[in-house]
Amino acid sequence: MELQKVYFFTATIKSWVPLLDRKGFKEILVESLNFLSKKDLIRIYGFVFMPNHIHLILENIEMNGKEMPHASFLKFTSHQFLSKLRDTDPHALKIFRVSESNKSHSFWQRDSLAIELFSEDVAIQKLNYIHNNPCQGKWMLAADPVDYYFSSYKYYESGIDRFGFLNHLGERF
């Protein structure tokens, strides 16, 4: 990924485990995106948090030290997930255990998907996909996108950013 370009980004929890269904885990994602956004390192144009993966439409604005902001997001949330599981369900940690020299647990799969969005039409298509994801047959987390809380859908309907980090896609293209 490059700075100053808009991407459709998907990150998946290791082995598709529904970790994000646990209480407080989606809030960790919100907190991290809020932090990076307030530091003007990242812009989020759309998102949805599903039980075992996330979709974002994002733009990395500036490096976070030596890291791209999306990498900082994945790293920070991993540390927070580890801490939360140690406190609430240490037995679940075995699912995420790895034997790597730099870490003992891994929460995000390594194959995150990033597709550059070259046009507004394609960006809107991806935004619609994101917003409708919770209403798809496999998931059925909500009957209507407006009813699913952890999504940017309501922002695009009302203009109210209840998460504190959203930017309108129309202002970028």
Image: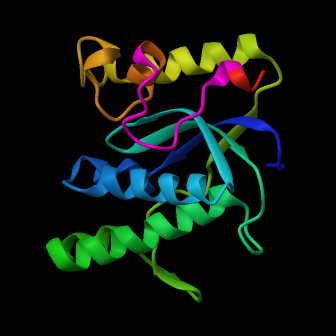
Highlighted range, magenta: 158-170
Q: Residue at x 34, y 23 (%)?
A: 134
Residue 40 vertical position relative to residue 116 in the rendered view, above or below: below
Q: Residue at x 24, y 79 (%)?
A: 86
The quadrant the C terminus occupies is: top right
Q: Nearer the viewer, residue 10 or 117?
A: 117
Q: Position of residue 124 (x, y in %)?
A: 64, 14
Q: Is residue 45 left or right of residue 153?
A: right
Answer whether residue 50 is magenta in the image: no
Q: Nearer the viewer, residue 128 or 173?
A: 173
Q: Is residue 64 visible?
A: yes
Q: Nearer the viewer, residue 154 or 101?
A: 154
Q: Position of residue 108 (x, y in %)?
A: 49, 59
Q: Is residue 96 visible?
A: no
* Among the 4 quarters of the image, the one containing residue 74: bottom right
Prevalent SS, magenta region: loop
Q: Looking at the image, which residue sits at the far bottom?
A: 101
Q: Nearer the viewer, residue 72 or 159?
A: 159
Badge count: 0
Q: Residue at x 45, y 68 (%)?
A: 78
Query: Which coloring applies here?
Result: rainbow
Q: Position of residue 129 (x, y in %)?
A: 52, 18
Q: Residue at x 35, y 67 (%)?
A: 81
Residue 110 vertical position relative to residue 86 in the rendered view, above or below: above
Answer whether residue 162 is magenta in the image: yes
